[in-house]
Image: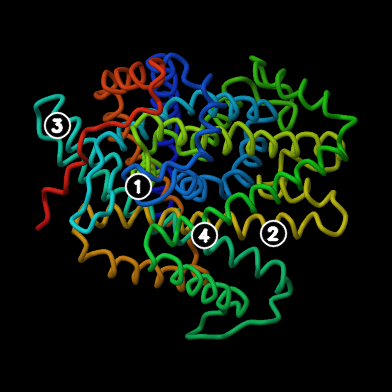
Amino acid sequence: MLNDFFTKFDNILWGVPMIVILLGAHIYMTVRTKFVQRKTLKAIKLSVTKDPDSDGDISPFQALTTALASTIGTGNIIGVGTAIALGGAGAVLWCWISGVFGIATKYAESLIAVKYRVKTRDGKMRGGAMYAIENGVSKKTGINFKWVAVLFAVFALFASFGVGCGVQTNAIAKIMDTTFNPDKTYMLHFFGMNISTVALISGVVIAICVALVIFGGIKSISRVCEKLVPLMAILYVIGCIIILSINFDVLWQTVTLICESAFSFKALGGGLAGTGIMLAARYGVARGLFSNESGMGSAPIVASAAQSRNSVRQALISSTGTFWDTVVVCLMTGLVIVSSCIKNPNIDTASVEGGELTSAAFAQIPYIGTPILVVGIVLFAFSTILGWSYYAESCVDYLFGPKGIIPYKVLFIVILLIAPITSLDIVWTMSDIFNAFMTLPNIFAMVVLAPVITKETNYYLYGNRLDEYDKTPVPFVKRRK
């Protein structure tokens, strides 16, 4: 009953109102930044340019890859498949459109995060929506909105235990169990429960690997993500390119079907053919927003730790995260699934789940297709755990100070050990709900600070001052001794 209640609440929360709010924020920020998306190529170039003489804990590229670690995940693989299964082929185009406009939102939220970041007494940078609300919104309005900042940090902390920890390690354990223990041969019987030995071992290995990384702090996390994220993305994209090469003869038909289904005002028979513009837009936009996290306020937390000479420079770099996540990776996944379904009509798009659509597509690659997908899911989920661990660490530091960080990390590892052998339906639902609750105060901050975003953008970006140093001293945290 409890699970049913939260599921219905989640469906309402992530229904039309949230889509309107997020897509509206995307369009509003696109207008306020004068279509900052046209600067994407410049932003990509800046992302691989070091800025060692600036304040910060990690390089801009490390900040980007750490943010990408949490955004490029199972949503890119399973989420796109689910959007197509529920909304038809047209959902791919709507997912892509949400990503294009989401670049401006990711830029805006990262700008204010860096603009209002603070420095701890031991020299670490901290930032994110909580500091932008407390130090920016409160000053701008003359009203103390610290309580809203606290709510954002609490919501992000709870979300980290779900979508950033529990469900990710559970996904890894399930894919490993399905691959290496399909007949349930290796089982343990413990207090009346049947526990998969493979899932249990997976949880232990994941917990050990994560512990070795996260107890080293943001520098350790960013070094791993810097190497892991490009590797896993390249591996996955190569797999997609191979499948698209196999399906080359139906690529034009694929693009045509996606475009026609996206703007059809009536259902074309369900399944791949299309479910009408409303469902295609709903599921495409929703999955695009969920995948790239633009507007959620998560990625700006790590952007605040980057070495950057001004807020606009790092905001541009952070905006490329949405470009790579949705405009590139989600689009390729969508093309792979739709073209595979066209070429293999026996795939029943109306009755299978999203993850099964992706599996069926990768199975086209003889021998190595399924292993590539399995490795991709494992790496994507593992990197998501690392990225979210830092988001939550920053929130714990904001709420409780440095003394709360070690206990939080211990609890994080304990959840990693338990999650693989636990049913997480309600945890996943609650994570969705907390993600929505994170989004609302973050968008509130962006809207209130829109004049600041416009002013900074006009001065540094459109005034050709990206190389100029912001001389404003980074303030120290006021709340701690």
User: Helix or strand or loop: what does disc 2 sit on?
Assistant: helix
Name the residue beneath numbered marker 2: 374
- Distance Cα–Cα, label 1 vs label 2: 32 Å
- Choose mark 4 or mark 2, whichever is in front: 4
Name the residue beneath numbered marker 3: 138
Kindly indicate the quadrant of the structure image that contains residue 403.
bottom left
Sequence order check: which comes first, mark 4 or mark 2?
Answer: 4
User: Helix or strand or loop: what does disc 3 sit on?
Assistant: helix
Is the C-beta separation of discs 1 and 2 under 8 Å? no
Q: Is residue 70 above or below residue 269?
A: below
Name the residue beneath numbered marker 1: 305
Name the residue beneath numbered marker 4: 224
- Distance Cα–Cα, label 1 vs label 4: 16 Å
Which residue is nearer to you in this view: 157 or 111? Answer: 111
- Choose mark 1 or mark 3, whichever is in front: 1
- Distance Cα–Cα, label 4 vs label 2: 20 Å
- Distance Cα–Cα, label 2 vs label 3: 47 Å
